[in-house]
Image (cartoon, rainbow, N blue to C red):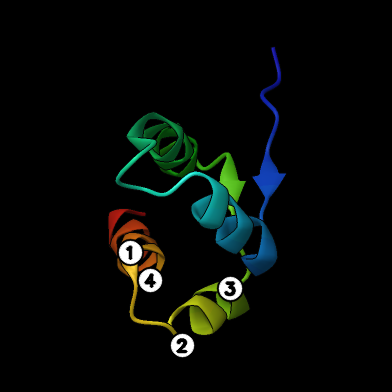
Amino acid sequence: MTSNCYIIDTSSLVQLNRNNPLDVFPTIWKKLEALIKENRLVAPKEVLLEISQNDDQLNKWAKNQKKNV
């Protein structure tokens, strides 16, 4: 059986965080983390660069995911 793989962009993560903040909806973010660990969710390097322009929860989360890969 083949698993789906996904590519995510900055606007998707920003919008997700805006509508489903990390601290309010941790389950959604844990599921994304699981996909990342399974190499089923990836993002271009530019996404981390764009997200890192803000010092917020999303920036910290994204940097942590980079360490976990």
Quarter location, residue 40: top right
Q: Write the residue at 70% across / 29% down.
A: 4
- State the mark number for residue 2: none
Front position in the image: 3 or 23: 23
Q: Is mark 4 on a helix, strand or loop?
A: helix
Residue topped by disc 2 = 53
The Cα atoms of the two marked residues, 1 and 2, are separated by 12 Å
Please identify, in this view, whether the residue under mark 3 or under mark 2 is nearer the observer.
Answer: 2
Q: Is mark 3 on a helix, strand or loop?
A: helix
- State the mark number for residue 57: 1
Going from N to C along the chain, the mark reached first, 4 or 2, is 2
Q: Is residue 30 left or right of residue 42?
A: left
Whether pointer 4 and pointer 1 mark residues with C-beta atoms closer than 8 Å, the reply is yes
Q: Write the residue at 58% across / 54% down.
A: 42
Q: Write the residue at 46% across / 88% down.
A: 53
- State the mark number for residue 47: 3
Quarter location, residue 65: bottom left
